[in-house]
Image (cartoon, helix red, strand yellow):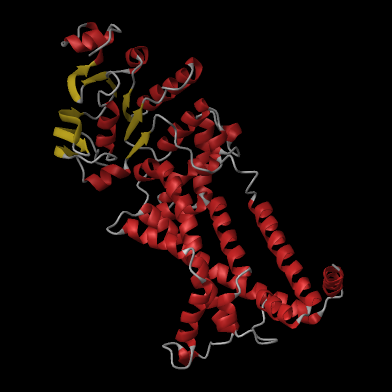
Amino acid sequence: MVSILPLKLSAASAHMHGKRLLGPVSLTLGQNGLTVVIGPNGAGKTTLLRLMHGLQRCSGGALSWAVPAAEARQRQAFVFQAPIMMRRRVIDSLAYPLRLRGIGKGEARAMARASAARFGLADLLESRAPLLSGGEKQKLSLARALIIAPEVLFLDEPCANLDGRATREIETLLLCERARGTRIVMSTHDMGQARRLAQEVIFMHKGVVHESGAAEPFFAAPDTPEAAAFINGDIVE
Amino acid sequence: MSGYSEGFWGAWRLIFTFDPELYEIIFLSLQVTVSAVIIASVIGLPLGAWLAVNRFWLRRYVIAVLNALMGLPPVVVGLFVYMALSRAGPLGGFGLLFSPAAMIIAQVIIITPLIASLSHQSIRDLWAEYHDLLISMNATRAQRIRALLWDGRRALLTATLAGFGRAIGEVGAIMIVGGNIEHVTRALTTAIALETGRGNFAFAMGLGLVLIVLAIIINLAIHIIGKTERASTW
């Protein structure tokens, strides 16, 4: 199967009610690895991820996948910062993306059980999804996104509201998924997490990309004073 | 006071002796109202969900009109349905006037806006919650509506019950289009009006008691079956 990547953004921008939210942004997302988008609040991290995934309309410039956009949309998934829980049991929530793709109820439920076991949710299959704890909800979100075996997974600050233990669980699952070949693009404001996970970094500030490239040189010697300040924990104006 | 107590005890006697006339009226009322609620739900629930999910020109005005129609005067509906179904009317050929079918049509017109409007409000809130997720999952428009109707079913049950409540207690429209004909179109409400006018308070009170108890039992049954309160945290 032909990969949907690379994803190319050429001077892409996003506006809402006449206000610029993002851009112009030009970058290319290659086929492998884990990219972490970092930057202070309001830098445009979420908007960039939403734009790439198609949740935010591209109001200027261009965004193109290696395959037609409709096909690319079928092979990617998104995990939101605040988990959106459907008012269903865990097993039905997990099976839902498969049911949308026309997979029969029995087969979808069997796949949901297997996925739940992998993500440590096996004991919660009959629980109501909205009543799970924060960490369980985020694990369910991740499992639900990955059940369709997406080629690209976008995550918007997936550990923002989680404690250390739940964060470690999510990170372990992400690293495992990266090892299986899923292309991961996630945003975070947690520098420790960015250092632990990132192979590539995109540093954003005021709606534009200030720096992007391999993680190691970026953290060792950032090119821009804003990035240096952000890495050092200083307030970036 | 003696009139009241006489009427009250007479009412219970009619109920517990299974008075055939009383039960005929009860069954007709239930038949008409349940049919109307089912038809109105089939129209109103998807309409409410569709209005919640779609953005189109004049949408705001369509919703405003729908909300206004919730207060549609039943006698006016009765008048229009009467004119439509009467021999000279556009649907006169079907011969439905003064039949239970005519009563169902009138009730459907009265309660569909109510069910559609209440379901629109519930689904709109759920859609705001689900929007990004369903778009992200590439759900088609029909799949989105199905998911919203299913996951919002408890709130929709309440909308349906509101429709049932309005229909079972309605008198003006069904009186006009049904004609309150004995053994044919005599429903609980029209019979109460008639028996009160005749001074037959025991029978009228019996019907009134049945109407109230019926409304309570059906509401309770649906709440219990639907686990509405138990699942309120959803």
- For the C terminus of chain B, the quadrant is top right
The answer to whether residue B101 is visible is: no
The answer to whether residue A99 is visible is: yes
Q: Nearer the viewer, residue B184 or A60?
A: B184
Please indicate whether residue A66 sits to the left or right of residue B162 in the image.
left
Q: Position of residue B144 (x, y in %)?
A: 41, 52
Up/down of B79 relative to B167, above or below: below
Q: Position of residue A63 (x, y in %)?
A: 17, 38
- For the N terminus of chain B, the quadrant is bottom right
Residue B90: which quarter of the image? bottom left
Up/down of B234 relative to B12, above or below: above
Picture mark count: 0
Please indicate whether residue B166 sits to the left or right of residue A83 in the image.
right
Q: Nearer the viewer, residue A101 or B128?
A: B128
Q: Position of residue B14 (x, y in %)?
A: 84, 75
Q: Residue at x 66, y 58 (%)?
A: B219
Q: Nearer the viewer, residue B80 or A222?
A: B80
Q: What is the residue that sits farthest to the front in this orientation?
A: B1
Q: Residue at x 57, y 76 (%)?
A: B172
Up/down of A153 relative to B100, above or below: above
Q: Nearer the viewer, residue B112 or A12?
A: B112
